[in-house]
Image (cartoon, rainbow, N blue to C red):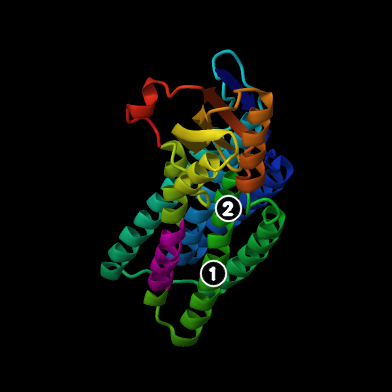
Amino acid sequence: MAHQHAHARGSAGNTGALGRALALVLVMLGAELAGAWWSGSLALLSDAAHMFTDAAALAISLLADRMARRPADARRSFGYQRFEVLAAVLNAVLLLLAAAYVVWEAWRRLHAPTRIGSGVMLAVAVLGLAVNLLGMRILAGGQSDNMNLRGAYLEVWSDMLGSVGVIGGAIAIRLTGKDWIDSAVAVAIGLWVLPRTISLLRASLHVLLEGVPEGIDLEQVAARLRGCPGIADVHDLHIWSLGSGQVSLSVHAVVAHGHAPDDVLLRRTRTLLADGFGIHHSTVQLEQQPCEQADGGHGF
């Protein structure tokens, strides 16, 4: 019986990009809080709430990125890569809480209208739009393949849309004098990002629950392994992810009659997994006879 591992490291997060984006967001957060207080705008306060979650999320993401790059140790044999997934979950929860607060405040203002300073509201929103566009440009490079950066990018992206909404609301209030538009814009900002936030939360929880990574079909992997020359059958197949791009696999493979459970067969199976499915971290246990787990209901 042979038992062997193949390893490959995923890419580290872009710490510099997260640091620069965090600095921008902190500056803009102060400006929006001051603007919301001065103008009385709930829309600006809503955008500031998102800015606050941005700042918290980016700080968490920065910590998570640094932690994920720490090597494995005696207590954490898989390392710290799950920190980026935990950060993504916390980011999503913060956005959901901010949206709930804004909807509640808008409902309260329907019964106690507040006069809005549309000029200050417009000026701060334009500045916020510029800062968010710059932040999106900083984070865009790594967000497609890193869940941590994806969460941070989503935060800034939602704030960019919020700034656009505040600009439109400020112009509408200035032209019509209807202050209720501010609350409507605030609610729209809070609700707009919900589907994307839920999507991020669902994807993060899927990783934490050891789900099969998106884009990989467990049955197809099993079929390809069974079709590998020298492999008669497979069982106890598990595919999961530690974090972005960190796909792992473990499997018991029964060696076909006339073949030996040797390094040649191991290399063949590892090459199939790497070239066919992009799985570079694999644990393959070769068996001449199926072990007790073959009929035990464990894995696929």
Q: Which residue is mark 1?
A: 121
Rendering quarter of residue 35: bottom right
- Percent position of residue 217, x then y: 48, 49
Q: Which kind of residue does numbered mark 2 sit on?
A: Leu
Q: Residue furthest left?
A: 111
Identify which residue, 45 or 19, lies in the foreground.
19
Q: Which residue is mark 2?
A: 29
Residue pictured at 53% horizontal, 61% vertical:
158
Q: Residue furthest front?
A: 258
Quadrant for the N terminus in the image? top right
Identify which residue, 256 or 16, lies in the foreground.
256
Q: Secondary structure at mark 1?
A: helix
Residue pictured at 54% horizontal, 34% vertical:
231
Q: Secondary structure at mark 2?
A: helix
- Percent position of residue 40, x then y: 45, 64
Identify which residue, 113 or 140, lies in the foreground.
140
Q: Please say if 78 is above or below 159.
A: above
- Percent position of residue 262, x then y: 64, 22
Q: Point out the frontmost of discs 2 and 1.
A: 2
Quadrant for the C terminus in the image? top left
Q: Residue furthest top?
A: 74
Q: Residue furthest bottom?
A: 175
Q: Can residue 120 be seen here? A: yes
Q: Which kind of residue does numbered mark 1 sit on?
A: Met
Residue extent of the magenta highlight? 182-196
